[in-house]
Image (cartoon, rainbow, N blue to C red):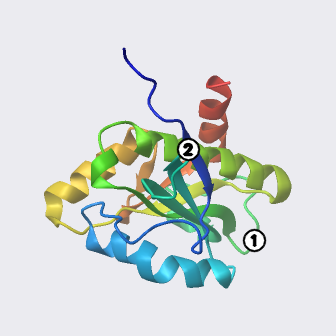
Amino acid sequence: MPTEPPALRIERFDPARHDRAGFDCGVARLDNYLKLSARKQQRDDMIRVHVAVEDGSVRILGYHAISLGTMNADELERRLRGTPAHGELPVLFLGQVAVDRAAQGKGLGGILMHHVFEKACAVADMAGCHAILLDVVADGGETAFARRRGWYEGFGFTAFASNPARMFLTMKQVRAMVGAGR
């Protein structure tokens, strides 16, 4: 008799409760961030980390880290009408998305991205937010970089002409995706 797979929860990272010791996404920098830096940065209100766990488990299967920031409108192909004189546009910065090797290839990364989109909509509704901004991790060489960049492009992210590792997705695009899923 087949059984239902365990339900996933995405919740705010609690270092006293969530088991991050065995987390291994295949990129040492992302593993080490969760194990060594996330707790302090979250405690100091620099970032918010959200983790994916199975119901009844504290083992982290994946995570994303978000913070607030700005991007200069001059980095865009063309400056938007109505941009403030100082040129800074508010953004939600996506620091990392990582999935444990044991959970890779099962759609968890997409679930985490959808959670980021929902958080971005909430931020934009409360304080204004023009886009989600991220820097693609370059660890592992050109092939790994191209694969990661392609994954983000699949969600609609666009690279800056001046920096192919920096990508953005406007809130208009995010709201269209989140609204389509409702």
Q: Mark 2 or 1 closer to N-term?
A: 2
Query: Of the residues shown, which amino acid type is indicated by label 1?
Result: Ala
Residue nearer the viewer, 76 or 124: 124
Residue 41, position in %: x, y?
58, 81
Residue at (45, 58) in percent of width and height: 59
Residue at (84, 55) in percent of width and height: 126
Farthest residue, direction top: 1
Q: Is residue 161 above or below residue 121?
A: below
> Tag 1's secondary structure?
loop
> Tag 2's secondary structure?
loop
Quick one: label 1, few (<14), some, or many (20+) residues within 10 Å?
few
Q: Is residue 143 above or below residue 154?
A: below
In the figure, is residue 159 to the left or right of 82?
left
In the figure, is residue 36 to the left or right of 93?
left
Which residue corresponds to mark 1?
85
Residue nearer the viewer, 70 or 14: 14
Farthest residue, direction front: 1
Q: Is residue 81 above or below residue 22?
A: above
Please tell me how many numbered marks the rendered image carries.
2
Residue at (37, 17) in percent of width and height: 2
Q: Quadrant of residue 114?
A: top right
Quadrant of the rendering where the N terminus is positioned: top left
Which residue corresponds to mark 2?
55
In the figure, is residue 150 to the left or right of 56?
left
Residue 6: assigned label: none
